[in-house]
Image (cartoon, coloured by chain):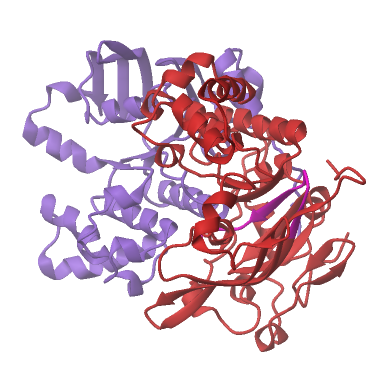
Amino acid sequence: MPPRGGQRRRVLRVRDLRVSFGGPGGRFAAVDGISFEVGRAEALALIGESGSGKSTIALSLLRLLPEGAHASGRVELLGEDLLELPEASLSRVRGSSIAMVFHDPLAALNPVMRIGAQIAEALRAHARLDRRVAAATGLDLLQTVGLAPQTAKRYAHELSGGMRQRALIAVALACGPSLLVADEPTSALDAVTQRNIAALFRKVRRERGIGLLLATHDLELAAELCDRIAVLYAGRIVERGAVSDLLSKPRHPYTAALLRSVPPGLGGPRVRLVPVPGSPPPSWARPSGCAFRDRCSRALPDCAAAEPELTGSDGREVACFHPVEAA
Amino acid sequence: MTAPLLELDRICVDRGGIRVLDGLSLSIEPGEMLGLVGESGSGKSTLARAALRLIEPTSGAVRWRGRDLLAFTPRELRAARREMQIVFQDPATSLDPRMTVAESVAEPFEVHRLATAAERGDRVTELLRRVELGPELLHRYPHELSGGQAQRVALARALAVNPALLVADEALSALDVSLRAQMANLLLDLREGAGIACLLVSHDLRLVASICDRIAVLAGGALVHLGPASGIASDTRHPAALALVEAARPGIRIRRQT
């Protein structure tokens, strides 16, 4: 879905974000100078393997990084720099302009509070709402996410995985956020439920015009939900573009290799799967030059000399000295 | 014709007054890759555990190499258990956090009294090599491993006793797409090299279809489809199996050349 003309306004603007952690051999950067934007009602996927930095980016947007992590750069949400914001103002932003849907809804929902009360709490935290109005709005939200009204009286442990994820989405939507940050929102669910939750995300985006930042390793989920994809490798964006263009004509060898590792469709001949060879470097021991070169079939000596910059035009960028040529 | 490696014969399992598995029959041949798919709650994990007698079926028979597993003496059961190993979804919970990789992988040798203390070191290194892990991991603890490394350690531990059957209970599900492909190839190599049969429990039908010989589909505790992996998209009529086939439709067109 292309962003609708005229309505396109920037919700999120991230500039040169760096996140470092303390490690055995000194501090290291898990996120190493990343810039991106999400427009109103636009959806951007951050694609990467575990350790690529995608979850760290998601958490740093809400300033939820663990103790000892240090973030620098700018994270502007509706023009306001979240990294500069005093702790006291953060709770105003979290849940009102930006809300997060986590991988594990059981851990994210309050186990001793009924679902309805959690939605009402989120509603009342950011708007002066009468208890009864909050309850009624909560029921509307449950309907939006495809849950029965009785779910309001349930506790998280009484729900299936898919229902919990729907409940968590209802809580996230309660305050009318401009941006939804979702970190692997379907990876704990079975295949059929994954599809249903993906459909729910699409519906919510369409109906409410919410921006979506999706951190995932699931290329197909990204293709289904997002307009653009940024591929992360070892804390940097290595390729970026519109979904269909990037997936049909990958230019970075890593993107191409990642696409080849996806199992083929049903009914074809049996094939051996083709994983990306080797494993990503740990973030505390990133090699010089291009971080992917040890696993890359196109690597040449110059790949070790310098780190390729993300360059390109028309929203299509790649950070590679020897990209795959467009067919 | 030789007997199947493992045979489930009209197995029922009740838990808390609910019938979780309902008269299910299924067998695995030696060296076979059998995929077991179904939605959450369909009974996949219960079946995997009942097959290894980690839970006792309410009724029905489980036969291991043609003999009634449920009638095995504790000593016979221990011997059979050496041949049947299980790898779970979350290696973080199946590996002992206080044990190094070397200790974890060597533990089965001690439990089953398989190798002398002197031999164990070499055997452990050899097992790690089989799962494509380097010896530099030997003295790491589970929290120092990535998810993919930890899952390989769990697999190495399972392989320590030369099993005839490996049950992988969503063992690939928590991994990234590339790691998943690596592990899938590893399971295929184990079958080719050591003839290890595998019951691959997964919700990823495309992955299962790409590496398994046959696929069994569970729904509501019953077997609703069983057939060759190649025919899963065309041969099934059951709505639950069709829903899985539909959900497995590729979401992207993939360019398969470099």
Please give left or right for residue B66 compared with residue A116 in the image. left
User: Image quadrant for the C terminus of chain A?
Assistant: bottom right
* Letter of the chain in red: A
Let me know if residue B118 appears in the view. yes
Give the number of marks: 0
User: Image quadrant for the N terminus of chain A?
Assistant: top right
Let me know if residue B204 appears in the view. no
Magenta range is A37-50
Colour of chain B, in one word, is purple
Height in image: A83 above or below A274? Answer: below
Point out the residue furthest to the right here: A5
Assess whether residue A17 is covered by the magenta stretch. no
Residue B208 image offset from top left, x and y in percent: 53, 36
Assess whether residue A38 is covered by the magenta stretch. yes
- Image quadrant assignment for residue B148: bottom left
Residue A169 image offset from top left, x and y in percent: 57, 34
Judge by depth and name the residue closer to the eye, A1 or A81. A81
Judge by depth and name the residue closer to the eye, B65 or B167. B167
Q: Which residue is rendered at x = 43% and y = 24% of the image? A: A159
Height in image: B58 above or below A263? Answer: above
Residue B201 image offset from top left, x and y in percent: 43, 34
Judge by depth and name the residue closer to the eye, B167 or B31. B167
Please give left or right for residue A245 compared with residue A25 in the image. right
- Image quadrant assignment for residue A68: bottom left
Height in image: B116 above or below A8? Answer: below
Q: Which residue is rendered at x = 67% and y = 59% of the image? A: A257
Residue B254 image offset from top left, x and y in percent: 75, 47
